[in-house]
């Protein structure tokens, strides 16, 4: 990058979006012990930030049609996840954005938060739309939700959401 | 990068304290030296977007270069744009694009076949080394091509400023880590290397330390973004809107 000037000119729009995403995301530096209270704080921050400050929402919004954009403005992640009126498309976009975030996360803490939001989007869709937007089986989801519920750093609202979703997973499994 | 094309556009890393609107106001106020410096900054930031807009409109390479020079010389530096500048118009580039369209219409009317370039080129035409528009803009309209090129220029400036800043502060390894861990994977659409591997490669004690080094560069990148975005808006309050506008535009990439 230093010897010869390079340019982003020629990159695809999604690549430009990813680079721009680095500029607007709120990163969390790696910590050696990933203390639970810090993780809880980070998760809380992610959940309550509103557009356009929340980079995860920005990325998610960029995945869905521009016509849906205004619906997510001024909302926090927590509102988007808790609101029964959030559409399947919006939740799917949140799921995909957090999936991307978990693969590119710089720290374990950031990865844990991304994984949590991924599962929260899946849980929200199950609870509010009775629709499974994950490839995982109900058994696997039940197991994941249980693990997340047990985390000491988990946000109270998400514990409730995961509990409801876990119940639905068990009912679906019993119906088979 | 997928596009490894060299361009002299974009200018060196500088610390910008003024917005493009204040640049215009200062130019109107008549401080000649300062006007020239500030207008040169405008030129650096917008030459390429204007050129690409014209190329996308169907003008050939040389013709587009010539028209770009003419537009900047007659409309921007000739102060027609400045006289009409109004902060209430919002984004500077909206005003610029509107002025460009008016300029094209007036050129068409006059059917001016003569060269627009007044001799002493604003930007060396040899340096304007863009012969073809990239394939990625094939599905975009002309205004989006302008916007696309503007975003690329913005990102190029952000990256360049941060890299220079890192090198000047003895943070070369910080920059290399950021490049390899964050940028390269985006540019090559591949998974980022593990922190463990990067630590081994660069002789860093722990992954936590490497992660913090990457984080330090990301923070500088964020600061550069704000600094540069601030230039294109009328007030601090408009930066969020500007970011949203960019997100809306970049979202189009997810739809193709």
Image: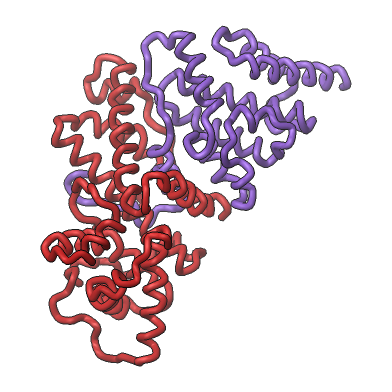
Between B168 and B204, the one lying in front of the other is B168
Chain coloured purple here: A
Direction right: furthest residue: A175
Quadrant in the rendering for residue B137: bottom left
The quadrant of the picture occupied by the C terminus of chain A is: top right
Q: Name the residue at 45% across, 66% down.
A: B143
Quadrant in the rendering for residue A137: top right
Q: How many marks?
A: 0
Q: Is residue B121 above or below residue B160?
A: below
Q: Provide residue B149's location: percent of width, then percent of height.
A: 37, 60
Q: Name the residue at 64% across, 25% down.
A: A120
Q: Name the residue at 36% across, 11% down.
A: A32
Q: Is residue A55 left or right of residue A122?
A: left
Between B107 and B66, the one lying in front of the other is B107
Residue B163 in sight in this render: yes
Q: Is residue A24 left or right of residue A43?
A: left
Residue A144 in sight in this render: no
Q: Is residue A79 left or right of residue B16?
A: right
**Palette colour of chain B:** red
Q: Name the residue at 30% across, 48% down.
A: B228
Q: Is residue B126 above or below residue A58?
A: below
Q: Is residue B187 above or below residue B71?
A: above
Q: Provide residue B27's location: percent of width, then percent of height.
A: 21, 64
The quadrant of the picture occupied by the N terminus of chain A is: top left
């Amino acid at each position: 990058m230093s010897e010869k000037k390079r340019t982003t000119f020629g990159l695809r729009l999604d690549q430009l979006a990813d680079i721009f995403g680095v500029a607007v995301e709120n990163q969390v530096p790696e910590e050696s012990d990933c203390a639970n209270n810090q993780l809880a704080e980070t998760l809380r921050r992610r959940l309550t930030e509103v557009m356009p400050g929340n980079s995860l929402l920005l990325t998610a919004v960029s995945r869905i049609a521009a016509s849906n954009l205004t619906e997510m403005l001024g909302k926090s992640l927590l509102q988007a996840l808790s609101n029964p009126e959030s559409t399947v498309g919006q939740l799917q976009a949140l799921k995909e954005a957090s999936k991307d975030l978990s693969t590119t996360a710089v720290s374990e803490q950031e990865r844990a938060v991304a994984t949590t939001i991924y599962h929260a989007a899946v849980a929200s869709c199950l609870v509010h739309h009775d629709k499974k937007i994950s490839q995982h089986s109900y058994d696997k989801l039940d197991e994941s939700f249980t693990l997340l519920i047990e985390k000491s750093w988990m946000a109270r609202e998400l514990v409730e959401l995961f509990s409801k979703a876990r119940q639905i997973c068990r009912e679906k499994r019993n119906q088979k | 990068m997928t596009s490894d094309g060299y361009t002299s556009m974009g200018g060196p890393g500088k610390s910008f304290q003024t917005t493009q609107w204040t640049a215009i106001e200062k130019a109107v106020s008549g401080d000649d030296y300062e006007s020239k410096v500030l207008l040169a900054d405008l030129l650096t930031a917008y030459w390429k977007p204007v050129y690409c807009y014209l190329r996308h409109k169907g003008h050939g390479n040389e013709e587009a270069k010539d028209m770009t020079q003419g537009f900047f010389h007659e409309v921007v530096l000739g102060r027609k744009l400045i006289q009409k500048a109004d902060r209430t118009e919002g984004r500077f580039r909206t005003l610029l694009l509107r002025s460009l369209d008016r300029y094209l219409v007036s050129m068409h009317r006059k059917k001016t076949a003569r060269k627009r370039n007044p001799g002493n080129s604003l930007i060396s035409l040899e340096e304007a080394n863009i012969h073809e528009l990239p394939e990625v803009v094939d599905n975009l309209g002309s205004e989006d091509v302008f916007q696309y090129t503007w975003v690329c220029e913005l990102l190029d400036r952000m990256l360049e400023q941060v890299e220079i800043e890192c090198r000047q502060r003895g943070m070369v390894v910080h920059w290399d880590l950021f490049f390899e861990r964050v940028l390269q994977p985006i540019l090559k659409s591949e998974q980022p290397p593990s922190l463990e591997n990067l630590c081994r490669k660069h002789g860093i004690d722990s992954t936590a330390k490497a992660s913090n080094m990457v984080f330090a560069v990301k923070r500088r990148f964020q600061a550069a973004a704000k600094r540069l975005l601030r230039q294109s808006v009328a007030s601090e309050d408009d930066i969020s809107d500007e970011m949203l506008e960019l997100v809306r535009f970049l979202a189009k990439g997810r739809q193709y």
